[in-house]
Amino acid sequence: MIKREQEFKNAIRARLSDDRYEHSLNVADECRKLAKMYGADEDKTYTAGLLHDILKDTELTKQRDYLAINGVTLEDYELMAPKLWHAVAGAFFVKEELYVYDNEIVDAIRCHTTGRRYMTLLDKILYTADYISKDRSYDCVDSMRQKAYKGLEYAVLEGLQYTIKKLISGRYVIHPDTIGAYNQTLREVLILEVAASSEAARDSRNEGVI
Ligand SMILES: [Fe+2]
Ligand SMILES: [Fe+2]
């Protein structure tokens, strides 16, 4: 149990629908599970999971006003993608209203919908947990869960691919941070695959020797 768990739960309960509240609790639980698995700070990731959608059910005009009073000027491609606003607005909100000053938590909340080029371990865990939490039931969720437990980068890459395909087929804009996240995560996955294949080749050579 984190020190401010009840306070944070009350804060999201007051702002979210029943379903979104349940989703946030599920994402937080998944965050803790992945943090344990990948050696991240469990309390920080749990906190990020609890708070990541805190403004998702807030009216869009209010989200936009909140961004404006915090000095954020939305780019044209951001104005065209209101679904992304709650992440940036939520990051300001947890800092300004809930006094969460841990930048790792705040940044993970800020990029949980788009990803970003150099995602931290916490960013990757929150991004992935949001895709595979208990309440999720889209077509390839089982494959995403398998990937998440095999290696976070594989899951993040699959999530980005899924999102980018959906955005293109629906003729939605793609945020440049999503492209940056995709390029960087692809690079990380390719490096992991090269390392795994040279390890496999070394093992088979060793087997031959013995
Ligand atoms: Fe979200
Ligand atoms: Fe979410």
Image (cartoon, helix red, strand yellow):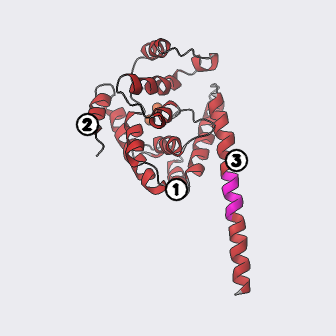
Q: In the image, residue 124 lies at what x, y percent?
A: 53, 44
Along the polypeptide, which appears first: circle 1 or circle 3?
1
Name above or below for residue 64 compared with residue 130. above
Q: Which residues are magenta?
A: 189-196
In the drawing, what numbered circle is on residue 165? none
Which is more toward the observer, 193 or 99?
99
Kindly report the distance in space between the C-alpha atoms of the residues bearing marks 1 and 3.
20 Å
Tell me how far mark 2 sits from mark 3, CA to CA.
40 Å
The three-letter amino acid code for the residue at tag 2 is: Gln
Q: Is residue 55 visible?
A: no
Say whether mark 2 is within 8 Å of ligand 2. Answer: no
In the displayed structure, does residue 90 sit left or right of residue 144?
Answer: left
Dividing the picture into quarters, in which one does residue 133 lie?
A: top left
State how far apart marks 2 and 1 are (Cα): 31 Å
In this rendering, which labeled residue sits more in front, label 2 or label 1?
2
Q: Which amino acid does the dot numbered 1 rest on?
A: Gln
Q: Magenta part mainly helix, strand or loop?
A: helix
Helix, strand or loop at label 2? It is helix
Task: Tell me the kind of residue under disc 3.
Answer: Arg
Q: Quadrant of ligand 2?
A: top left
Position of the C terminus by quadrant: bottom right
Tell me, yes or no, whether the two marked residues, 2 and 1, touch with CB atoms within 8 Å: no
> Label 2, on which residue?
6
The residue under label 3 is 187
Q: Is residue 22 left or right of residue 153?
A: left
Q: Which residue is mark 1?
A: 146
